[in-house]
Amino acid sequence: MKKREIRSAIKTVYQELWELLSLFEETEFFYKLPKGEKKAKKADEDAARKYVDKRICGIRKSVDSLFLGEKTVIKKLHRIIDETECFVNQCSIPGVVTRWKRVNPQLLYFDCAFDVMEKSPKFYLEMRRGLTDVHLSCYPDAEMVAKRKAYFERIREKNKLKNIEYSEDRIFQDELLNTLTLLFENDFMEYL
């Protein structure tokens, strides 16, 4: 394949993943079907899970058919799809793989560790010291707390200027979409 064709096909897969992740808030962590989808006879959660699985399979199919013979590109795209599938099956915030947090450390600002630290400081300290059977994915320090506070303040100010009020889920969704962009820019720099 020519570089131009690969670039175009990469953008197609990016768009498919972007469309899936952009459903995070609307589907309430992928527990509900998006608007416009026909309700199934089964429970909403089962129908939503099947819907997401079908979307993921469709994205894999796109990759396998668009990039036939391009093993390196396929491998990188399958990795992002696998990571996305891991996230949508976690049904938690941030719920992303470590690589995504490395690519976009701002995802850490949504970790429940901050809530535990604020609401149960004694329990948080015990967890941090390894004195409990509960473990967190991160243990924020004072610097990270300050950066998180500044991050949310910037978002509040930006939203105030635009006269909008996004939920924390929507802010997280926007950060997920930003992460997807960073992943594609990182993994496919030579094509974009």
Image: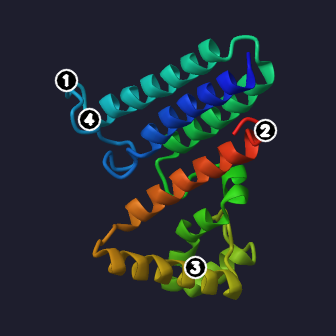
The local secondary structure at tag 4 comes to helix
Q: CA distance from mark 2 to mark 1?
A: 47 Å
Residue at 69% x, 40% y: name it: 192
Q: Nearer the viewer, mark 2 or mark 1?
A: 2
- The residue identified by callout 4 is 44
Q: CA distance from mark 2 to mark 4?
A: 42 Å
Kindly identify which numbered label has been placed on residue 169: none
- The residue identified by callout 3 is 148
Q: Earlier in the sequence, mark 3 or mark 1?
A: 1
Label 1 close to label 4 by CB (< 8 Å): no
The local secondary structure at tag 3 comes to helix
Q: Amino acid at mark 1?
A: Lys
Q: Is residue 64 above or below residue 161?
A: above
Q: CA distance from mark 1 to mark 4?
A: 8 Å
> How many neighbours does mark 4 have within 10 angstroms: few (below 14), some (14-19), or many (20 or more)?
some
Label 3 close to label 1 by CB (< 8 Å): no
Q: Is residue 82 above or below residue 120?
A: above
Q: Position of residue 46 (x, y in %)?
A: 33, 30
- The residue identified by callout 2 is 190
The local secondary structure at tag 2 comes to loop
Q: Amino acid at mark 4?
A: Asp
Residue at 76% x, 18% y: name it: 70
Q: CA distance from mark 4 to mark 3?
A: 34 Å
Q: Nearer the viewer, mark 4 or mark 3?
A: 3
Q: Earlier in the sequence, mark 2 or mark 3?
A: 3
Kindly identify which numbered label has been placed on residue 41: 1
